[in-house]
């Protein structure tokens, strides 16, 4: 046991919890990690409440001075590397490899872990989408076209929708763009099966992380966080669907007018 | 075979998007490939319907993800999220919207129900496997 003051431990655990929660860890994992760290540093009175976008942590025995910390956590994109890193760190803390301040520094480094560069992400989104397009038994040409379309769509996502738009509107615009480019490509004759292409192009928007974590929170009994995440996933699904639908409807209208 | 390979590569590409560390790429790809393989096997060879096939594929993916998580000592989410992706009913949702827009309400309803069924089945399968006690997975290690 290392003797450290409660304030430090409280801040350390909250920060660990914050990184975990915003990078897409499940609620019970966050709670467990925080509890483990607190116990290792000898703060047995610590209590943690983790919900969808906030962590509430208190410590202090009854009758003595008590401390509390509330941390708001904005929804952000999945960073599983951070989850893995914090998980590893908490395990090492338990083995007694870190003092409190060392662990704090380590957490700071984890928080600064860089994303893969934009080009790599764009490239691999293209690859992934093309592969999923191939799963639908699309032709090779379709897959290649989808590769470029989703690369374009992801570029749009990185530059416009993630920076300047809310999540719902962002998803909406991105799926409109995806559908529109697919339709145009089909009209130009560089793509055969429109449906396969659209599905391939929008698969990058599908909220896999929110859905999976929502399920896991729900089954863990954390209904509030679970429903927040499921709602997140649901809204994403709906806005993608609306985007696709609107584009189709508009194109049909315009096409009808042109041919009349 | 090509399909399985494609599922594996696709899963790996998307796991990269979620920021999975490099050392887990291979397992992610493996899970994605195997999961899709099982789905195909059930759906095409054994003539199961889509829902049943998705159910068993998800069960298998979740099992595998838990095994890897214990073996590699890392959060199970890492493997699960990427592995599930090929099974999420993107196609059904697409067709639902497509039929809705082209005023074919009945077909839209049919596809929409199919999509909901698939999602429910995925949820069920994941929940089921996570009810298994941890011991079941740790025993293998010792």
Image (spheres, grey):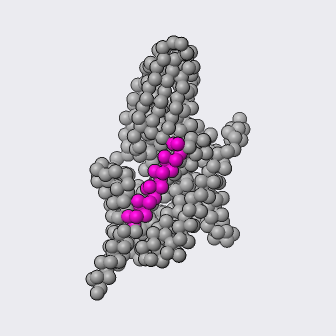
Q: Left or right: where does residue B133 sit relative to residue A111?
A: right
> In the rendering, at what x and y percent does residue A182 appear?
36, 70
Q: Residue at x 41, y 59 (%)?
A: A239
- Residue A222 lies in what quarter of the image? top right
- Judging depth in this view, the residue of B141 and A240 nearest the camera is A240
Does residue A96 belong to the magenta stretch? no
Residue A88 seen in render: no
> Dividing the image into 4 quarters, which one contains the C terminus of chain A?
bottom left
Instruction: Reply above or below: A253 against A245.
Output: below
Q: Residue at x 46, y 20 (%)?
A: A67
Instruction: Reply above or below: A100 against A246.
Output: above
SS majority, magenta:
helix
Q: Left or right: where does residue A183 sit relative to residue A60?
A: left
Q: Report the number of numbered marks.
A: 0
Instruction: Reply above or below: B20 against A44.
Output: below
Instruction: Reply above or below: B22 against B46.
Output: above
Q: Residue at x 67, y 71 (%)?
A: B47
> In the rendering, at what x and y percent does residue B137 appear?
68, 41
> In the rendering, at what x and y percent does residue A160 appear?
29, 53
Q: Residue at x 53, y 71 (%)?
A: B109
Residue A160 seen in render: yes
Residue occupying the far bottom of the picture:
A260
Magenta segment boundaries in residue numbering: A224-244
Q: Left or right: where does residue A248 sit relative to residue B87?
A: left
> Dividing the image into 4 quarters, which one contains the N terminus of chain A?
top right
- Residue B139 lies in what quarter of the image? top right
Does residue A228 belong to the magenta stretch? yes
> In the rendering, at what x and y percent does residue A94 appear?
56, 24
Residue occupying the far front of the picture:
A63
- Judging depth in this view, the residue of B17 and B126 nearest the camera is B126
């Amino acid at each position: 046991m290392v003797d450290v003051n409660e304030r430090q431990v409280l801040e350390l655990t909250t920060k660990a919890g914050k990184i975990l929660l915003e990078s897409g860890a499940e609620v019970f994992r966050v709670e467990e990690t925080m509890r483990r760290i607190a116990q290792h540093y000898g703060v047995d009175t610590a209590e943690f409440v983790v919900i969808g976008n906030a962590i509430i942590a208190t410590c202090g025995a009854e009758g003595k001075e008590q401390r509390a910390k509330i941390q708001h956590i904005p929804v952000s994109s999945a960073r599983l590397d951070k989850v893995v890193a914090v998980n590893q760190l908490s395990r090492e803390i338990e083995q007694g490899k870190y003092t409190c301040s060392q662990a704090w520094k380590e957490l700071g480094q984890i928080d600064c872990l860089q994303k893969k560069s934009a080009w790599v992400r764009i490239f691999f989104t293209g690859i992934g989408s093309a592969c999923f397009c191939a799963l639908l038994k699309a032709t090779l040409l379709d897959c290649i076209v989808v590769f470029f379309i989703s690369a374009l769509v992801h570029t749009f996502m990185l530059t416009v929708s993630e920076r300047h738009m809310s999540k719902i509107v962002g998803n909406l615009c991105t799926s409109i763009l995806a559908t529109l480019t697919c339709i145009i490509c089909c009209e130009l004759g560089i793509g055969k099966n429109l449906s396969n292409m659209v599905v391939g192009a929008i698969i990058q928007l599908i909220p896999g992380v929110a859905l999976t974590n929502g399920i896991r929170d729900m089954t863990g009994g954390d209904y509030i966080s679970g429903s927040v995440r499921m709602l997140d996933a649901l809204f994403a699904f709906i806005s993608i669907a609306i985007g696709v639908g609107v584009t189709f409807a508009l194109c049909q209208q315009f096409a009808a007018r042109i041919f009349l | 075979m090509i399909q399985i390979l494609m599922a594996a590569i696709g899963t790996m590409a998307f796991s990269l998007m979620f920021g999975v560390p490099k050392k887990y790429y291979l397992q992610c790809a493996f899970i994605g490939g195997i999961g899709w393989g099982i789905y195909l096997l059930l759906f095409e060879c054994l003539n199961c319907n889509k829902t049943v096939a998705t159910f068993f594929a998800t069960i298998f993916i979740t099992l595998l993800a838990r095994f890897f998580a214990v073996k590699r000592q890392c959060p199970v989410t890492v493997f699960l999220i990427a592995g599930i992706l090929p099974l999420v009913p993107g196609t059904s949702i697409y067709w639902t919207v497509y039929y809705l827009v082209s005023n074919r309400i009945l077909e839209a309803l049919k596809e929409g129900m199919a999509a909901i069924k698939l999602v429910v089945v995925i949820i069920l399968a994941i929940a089921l496997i996570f009810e298994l006690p941890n011991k079941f997975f740790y025993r293998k290690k010792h």
